[in-house]
Amino acid sequence: MIFRETSEAASEEEYDRRRRAQWLAGEARADGVARRDMLRLLAAAGAAVTLPVSLGAPRARAAAADAAAGIVKPLPADRFTIRGTNAETKFEALAETGFHTPASHFFVRNHTATPVLDAKTWSLRIWGDGLESGEAQEFTLADLKRLPSTSRTAFVECAGNGRSFFTTQQGRPVPGTAWTLGAIGNAHWRGVRLSEVLRRAGVSRHAVDVLPRGLDAQYVTDDGTNLGRVRRPLPLAKAMDDVLLAYEMNGAPLPADHGYPVRVLVPAWVGIASIKWVGDIEVSSTPLYSPWNTEFYRLFGEAYPSQGSAPLTHQTLKSAFELPWNASLRASRTHHLTGRSWSATGAITRVDISTDEGRTWRAVHLKDTPHRSGWTRWTTPWHPKTPGPATLLARATDTTGHTQPETTAHNTQGYLFDAVVRHAVRVV
Ligand SMILES: Nc1nc2c(c(=O)[nH]1)N[C@H]1C(S)=C(S)[C@@H](COP(=O)(O)O)O[C@H]1N2
Ligand SMILES: [Mo]
């Protein structure tokens, strides 16, 4: 079971059902969402579906996105693997970092390219019919900094982190960025609560969804479809809970690649929720759809209903060794293996490793006291005797009692891989 039955997941499903019904009644908007994607979501609503006449903005054809990485910060080869417009952190490079991931090592996931924005002219526009006055409100960076600030540790992790293992371990290719395990970083963030800003903007009791949107370029898919600016609806209940408008990362202004001057930070949720370079937030009294909660970021496949799962919320459970793939380790020596495990729904309570293909397991030493935010670092000695190929397995358990499974149920876009990863090494 990869989509945890937390009460929050259940309520997201319930909310999504309502959202669909409202859309059918012409009471929800789906600007920029393809007709076939809405039809798929509505499959479960059964019966003959009559689509509203207008399906939002036309899907323009535009030039393909810049193929260059479009990332501003240096990406040294010992720290990052470039994957198209994205940069994956090499897990072995995290061994030289502590609990928090410095920006110099933090993965970057860009749909297009990092825009370099001027904080002096930047402002955040809060608008929509979910505001009491109906009038848009502007907040400059200085305005946001005058409001009470909140700091917290949280990781940002791509929903597709671990995607490549659907192909390499489970034999079923999936499209999308072929991340190994390095599409995660854990930072200390400071900013203002989104709830604080929404209250000041005069959020009304009729508001149901908020839609933060990035100032980066419009996203054009490989087949030439322009999906518009990166944006993903957030249910108001979540927006009013623990979401931050972050302007600092690890005690410094946000770096350009991570959303300068301000990004949304939705702790524990799939990375796409944490919109970078946020320029405006629509507050809506009718439910909203975007391609990022219809076509993307739901689970489709034989293990799921035909209309897909509810939009993804929490990340899942994972473990990684701080070792290169196919690392060479000397035989007849004691190696102190290190790694990290993390969960979005609880604290890590134990991690076991196996060096004999899963026949025997032993608990590792946890270096961090279990906590709910961020990962838990661990270490364990290993004394390999015979040269030859070997496989290292690490398997975490969290406070909800969930343990990493042997396989993850397939989903067509390769999200939320949570199975134990088989890390190949060579004993020499
Ligand atoms: N505006 C904007 N926000 C965005 C994205 C983007 O391309 N544009 N990518 C999202 C995705 S898919 C992820 S996983 C995280 C990555 O955050 P990072 O680049 O700071 O690591 O940002 C999210 N926010
Ligand atoms: Mo992502």
Image (tube, grey):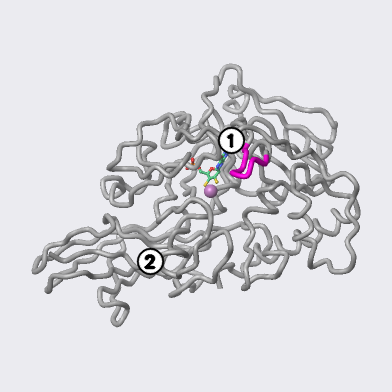
Magenta stretch prevailing secondary structure: loop
Q: Is residue 54 visible?
A: yes
- As helix, strand or loop, the secondary structure at mark 1 comes to loop
Q: Is residue 47 left or right of residue 345?
A: right
The one of 129 and 228 positioned closer to us in this rendering:
228
Q: Quadrant of residue 167?
A: bottom left
Residue 282 point in image, percent of width and height: 74, 37
Residue type for callout 2: Val
The one of 52 and 322 positioned closer to us in this rendering:
52
Q: Is residue 32 above or below residue 23?
A: above
Mark 2 neighbour class, 10 Å CA radius: few under 14, some 14 to 19, many 20 or more = many
Q: Mark on residue 64?
A: 1
Q: Residue at x 23, y 61 (%)?
A: 337
Q: Within 8 Å of ligand 2, the CB of disc 2?
A: no
Q: Is residue 201 above or below residue 1?
A: above
In the picture of the structure, the residue carrying the numbered disc 2 is: 421
